[in-house]
């Protein structure tokens, strides 16, 4: 039996055993390069636990890069596609997360690389609360009930992902800004991880008029990307154009603000 107090060292020893790694990799192959259904995912986990002799040992091994220099998390996410052909959370990913609990730094980084390779925002929204090293601490909204979560719909306008549009559906946008004191929504699209922030800010436009002015403030920040920008000329910066349109229902119609 594996000593629970030495679980990490035991897992590392097992990962160094060539035959053991081959057996574990072979078990996971049924769910790494295509989306495994619930029954197949359960069988993979069950066989893996039997091989590792402990669920705790498996939880450590799942966070080690033993499959082509990546963790199983990476391959399950990348193989799920961008969400256009398969909608939902892969059952194998759900079961792996249940076993692991909190993820270590190395596995979080590997999962980040997966999203920079394959930007599936549905999976990213599901898992991002377990990635504090990637997106920071996620603050839950007061309006966090199921069915009220922000969603995005990316539209890629070029093969290189240099030009794309994103539609945000944020239920109770104004209520969130007032009650939550702002919005901070992390998402992934076009090989990058982004933050959309929105809040009221107070400014004083003139010394002659001391009355404070309450204004909207929107910020779109690219926090991780798979690309490195190489300017054609020294000192030239990358410029992005952001067109913002607010579409809010009122009395059965829509108001458009630009």
Image (tube, grey):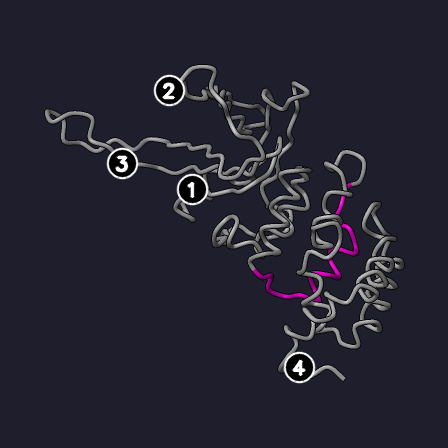
Give the Cα separation between the discs numbered 2 and 4. Answer: 55 Å
Labelled pair 1, 4 in contact (Cβ < 8 Å) = no
Residue 121, position in %: x, y? Answer: 65, 40
Labelled pair 3, 1 in contact (Cβ < 8 Å) = no
Give the Cα separation between the discs numbered 3 and 4. Answer: 55 Å
**Residue 177: mark in rendering:** 1
Residue 118, position in %: x, y? Answer: 69, 38
For disc 3, the marked residue is 202
Residue 143, position in %: x, y? Answer: 53, 50
Q: Of the residues under marks 2 and 3, which one precedes in the sequence?
A: 3
Give the Cα separation between the discs numbered 2 and 3. Answer: 34 Å
Q: Residue at x 58, y 61 (%)?
A: 104
The answer to whether residue 89 is seen in the rendering is no
For disc 4, the marked residue is 4
> As drawn, is 250 to the left or to the right of 40?
left
Is 197 rendered above or below residue 162?
Answer: below
Q: Of the residues under marks 3 and 4, which one precedes in the sequence?
A: 4
**Residue 15: mark in rendering:** none
User: Which secondary structure lies at badge 1?
Assistant: helix
Is 238 rendered above or below residue 174?
Answer: above
Q: Report crowding for label 3: few under 14, some 14 to 19, many 20 or more residues within 10 A (C-alpha).
A: few
Q: Report crowding for label 1: few under 14, some 14 to 19, many 20 or more residues within 10 A (C-alpha).
A: some
- Front of the two marks 2 and 4: 2
User: Which secondary structure lies at badge 2?
Assistant: loop
Q: Which quarter of the picture shows residue 101?
A: bottom right
């Amino acid at each position: 039996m594996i000593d629970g107090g030495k679980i990490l060292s035991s897992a590392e020893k097992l990962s160094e055993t060539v035959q053991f790694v081959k057996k574990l990799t072979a078990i996971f192959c049924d769910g790494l390069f295509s989306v495994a259904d619930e029954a197949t995912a359960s069988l993979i986990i069950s066989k893996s636990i039997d091989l590792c002799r402990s669920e705790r040992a498996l939880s450590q091994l799942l966070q080690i890069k033993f499959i082509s220099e990546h963790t199983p998390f990476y391959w399950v996410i990348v193989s799920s596609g961008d969400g256009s052909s398969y909608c939902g959370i892969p059952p194998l990913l759900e079961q792996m997360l249940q076993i692991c609990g909190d993820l270590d730094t190395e596995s979080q980084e590997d999962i980040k690389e997966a999203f920079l390779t394959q930007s599936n925002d549905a999976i990213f929204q599901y898992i991002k609360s377990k990635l504090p090293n990637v997106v920071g601490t996620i603050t839950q909204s007061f309006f966090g009930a199921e069915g009220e979560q922000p969603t995005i719909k990316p539209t890629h306008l070029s093969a290189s992902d240099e030009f794309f549009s994103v539609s945000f559906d944020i239920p109770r946008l104004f209520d969130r800004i007032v009650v939550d004191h702002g919005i901070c929504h992390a998402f992934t699209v076009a090989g990058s991880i982004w933050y959309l922030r929105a809040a009221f800010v107070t400014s004083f436009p003139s010394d002659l008029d001391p009355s404070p002015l309450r204004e909207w403030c929107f910020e779109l920040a690219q926090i991780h990307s798979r690309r490195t920008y190489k300017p054609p000329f020294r000192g030239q910066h990358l410029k992005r154009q952001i067109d913002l349109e607010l579409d809010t229902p009122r009395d059965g119609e829509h108001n458009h603000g630009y």
